Amino acid sequence: MFKKYDAYLVGYYGMRNSGDDALMYATAWGAKHLVGCGNSIVGLYGDHNRETHSNHKIALKFDQQFPGQNRLLHYKTALQCKRIIFGGGSVLHSETDINLKRQLMFLSNPKKSLAVGVGIGPFNSYGAEKSCAKFLNECGYVGVRDSESFEIAKRIAPNANVKKTFDLAPLLLCSKKYTPKKVARKGIALSLCSVAIDAMGKTDKLAEFHRFEKFTELITQLYVKTGEPITLIEFNGHSSLGDWQINNNIIRKLSNTVPITIEKYEANPIKLLENLASYRVIISMRLHGSILGYLAKTPVLSVNYHSKCEGWCQEIGMPYGYQIDLFNLNIEKIVSEIVKGLSTNFKSPTLSVNTALKNSLANWSIQNEQYKIYRNYSAI
């Protein structure tokens, strides 16, 4: 059968989430420059008019006109593609979603399909774990971004072609459009979000209120002790699930006492990366708030609410004092670390950004018995 496209790029793309935006950009860049997919297509939810850095896009629907509309669009596109590339993110945890990915590979070419920079688990059911094992054995190559995912993969699919690689986001640094701002750093930025307790995005309202109180106390103390202006960065601009909810509440409570602004959602990950280089320090709950801050060489304190956040801290060797447990917030300790860093120097992660980029590029150095793709790309 004639294949119209070199690759179908699949992820949680177009949902107004800065982390997924970065992964979409990095996947499209890697597919083109490192795998040689000169004619790719990306599946895009919601924001269909945005720049994708891919050649083509299909408009997936949040509000489907009939049940299964998106599934049919996926199937049609997969049939027209030489391979599927699953680009980044925590994409292997739900049985239904994993089975869809397996079907897309079957309609395209499983042995030429790739999953790069992905996270595995935690699974939402025993069936999800079984489906994931089948996916790993069927997919031509899987690069996982963290050690925990790699251990899971080797346990459930010991013979699959799975390699320990890295997150895809460092590939943003390869863009010719990226030019770090040469400005005097100023201010403290925070990337805050709600914590979902189920797959539908439901939250524990009482716990969220207590955390809101803690964060307003933290922001007040930071301003009192440092005099630095505060910026709340909106990493998720979704109309109902976005960061605007907690940010707006903080503004309402503190606007008369603390110089505080909101940096609205930025759809271009390159511009966001450049903006993050203008702050003196970032406090981030969002995983890719921590990752992009690190890439911008801005000191980051990671507020960990999920194993993926802890995994990132381990990957880069983040100083222990900069790893914050969301469920045991110690305001005095956080303020102390920031005051100390601003007055002297912040401690750096043990992993250099250049090494992180090389590790990210390793997602695309792919070799197995069925086929071979290998490209050299300088990280310097």
Image (cartoon, rainbow, N blue to C red):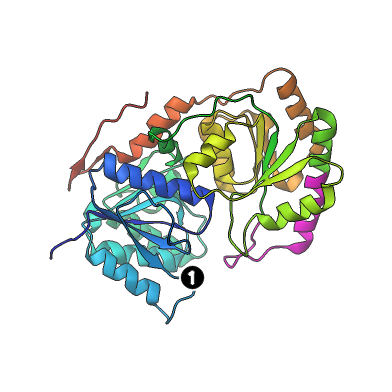
Say whether residue 225 is left or right of residue 119.
Answer: right
Say whether residue 217 is left or right of residue 74.
Answer: right
Say whether residue 239 is left or right of residue 112.
Answer: right
Is residue 281 or residue 227 the one in the foreground? 227
**Any magenta on residue 246?**
no
Is residue 195 or residue 219 the one in the foreground? 219
Where in the figure is residue 207, as x and y percent of width and height? 76, 57
Residue at x 62%, y 62% (from the top left corner): 241
Residue at x 77%, y 26% (from the top left corner): 339
Q: In this orientation, does residue 113 appear?
A: yes
Where in the figure is residue 251, as x and y percent of width and height? 78, 50
The quadrant holding residue 345 is top right
Residue at x 82%, y 47% (from the top left corner): 255
Is residue 259 or residue 123 the one in the foreground? 259
In terms of secondary structure, where does tag 1 sit?
A: loop
Farthest residue toward the top?
Answer: 344
Where in the figure is residue 19, as x and y percent of width and height? 51, 48
Farthest residue toward the bottom?
Answer: 66
Is residue 333 or residue 219 the one in the foreground? 219
Where in the figure is residue 9, as x and y percent of width and height? 34, 55
State the quadrant of the C terminus. Answer: top left
Identify residue for label 1.
62
State the quadrant of the N terminus. Answer: bottom left
Note whether 331 is above or below 244 in the view shown: above
Farthest residue toward the left?
Answer: 1
The quadrant holding residue 166 is top left
Q: In this orientation, does residue 312 appear?
A: no
Amino acid at the residue labelled 1: Phe
Note whether 217 is above or below 78 in the view shown: above
Magenta-drawn segment: 194-216
Residue at x 24%, y 58% (from the top left corner): 110
